[in-house]
Every structure is written in structure tokens, then in C-alpha cells.
Amino acid sequence: MQAAVAGFALGFSLILGDRGAERLCPAPGLRNSHVFAVCLTCALSDAVLIAAGVAGFGALVAAVPGIEAAMRVGGAGFLIWYGGRTLHAAWKGGERLEAAPVGAVGLRPALLTCLALTWLNPHVWLDTVVLLGAVSAQYADRLAFALGAMAASFVFFFGLGYGARVLAPVFQSPAAWRVLDVVVGLTMWAIAVKLLLM
């Protein structure tokens, strides 16, 4: 039980502190577009990466320092590009920032964006595979630790995805969408700077 609680606490804090905003901003929930599929994709992706880390891939990455550096630089570049794209959307405004009706965003584009923000972001790999994998080695029951960390991902992403619906009336305003895009874009840039300074 102690290992599971530790895994949950560490997993949740990593998502909340570094990856939640860039992986799943409330847009799917606000638009009522494929919320379950997007949340499930984020959570299952985390679960696969956590399993890889706890199974020992974290030790492999840690043994080859060049891989970690390449992941950090690549991740920073990706976040700078995506943050710039989000900030440009905030500056441009228009229909994209209005709350859309159910199904207005296609399932395939939504899932592809979600997968790209997860699997092409080395910061996610550093958190789930390297960090969680390394910390899990401290516990005799590594399976419980992994399950706790996986549970944190499910709680966070489904809570954020469905909780966003409460804010739907606020985000009927294009101005609110601009503010959200600015916050998400600046968050991505801040994470990119953090990666480059590690």
C-alpha cells in the first residue's frame, strides 16, 4: 500500500506540475468533443510509459547520458513550436476559439494531437520512463508503485476532461479562449526553458 500511495503521489505531482496543461488543455471537455476517448488515450499512454520505466527501461536510458540530452533538446524544440502555434492562435482569434458543438472536432484529429503531445514529447518520457522508473527501484513492490502512478494519470486526465464542462459557459466567449491559449502557450515555453536548463 505504501508503494502504491507513493506512486500515486509522485505521478500526480509530475502531471500537475509539468505536463497537464500541454497534454490535455480543457478544450475537449469544453467543446464536448470526444472527451472520453481523449482522456483514455492520455491515461493509457501514460500507463504504457510508466510500465516501461518500472520494467527497467529507465535504467537503460540513465546508462546512456546522450539519449537523455537528445530527448531534452528535442522536447524543448517541440514545446517551443507548439507553444508558438498556440500563441499565434490566441493572437489571431476567430472561429477556432469559439466553443464548438458536439462532434465539431473530428475524433481522428483529436486523438492524433493527443498522441503527438504525449509520444513526441521527451519531457513526458523523462517523467514517466526515467524518473518514475528510477524511483520505483526503491520499492520492493514495484508493481504497486506502477499501479499507483497509473491511477494518478487516470484521475488527473478524466478529472480535467470532464471537469472542464463546468467551465463551458465561461468559454463561450472568444476572449476566454484567447486567455486559455496564452496560458497554455506560455506554459509550454516555460517547460521548454526548464528542459534546456536541466
Image: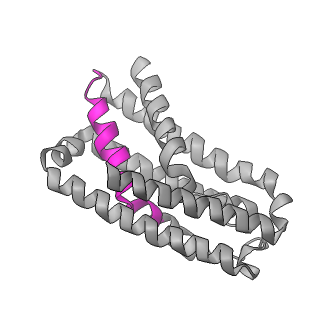
Q: Residue farthest to the left?
A: 63
Numbered range of the magenta stretch: 115-140
Q: Is residue 37 left or right of residue 30?
A: left
| Rendered image coloring scheme | one colour
Does residue 171 appear left or right of residue 12 in this picture? right
Picture quadrant of residue 147: top left
On the image, which quarter does residue 28 sit in? bottom right
Above or below, 169 against 155 in this view is below
- Return the x and y of residue 42 as percentages of the image width and height: 51, 55
Tell whether 183 sits left or right of 15.
right
The relative height of residue 78 versus residue 141 in the rendered view (above or below) is below
Q: Is 192 included in the stretch rendered in magenta?
A: no
- Percent from the top left, x then y, of residue 97? 73, 74
Q: Is residue 135 magenta?
A: yes
Between 86 and 153, which is closer to the camera in this rendering?
Answer: 86
- Please provide percent x and percent y for residue 83: 52, 67
The residue shown at (49%, 50%) is 19
Q: Nearer the viewer, residue 59 or 92?
A: 92
* Side of 137 relative to 162 (left or right): left
Nearer to the camera, 57 or 126 = 126
Q: Position of residue 115 (x, y in %)?
A: 46, 65
Magenta: main secondary structure equals helix
On the question of residue 184 being in view, the answer is yes
Q: Is residue 34 visible?
A: no
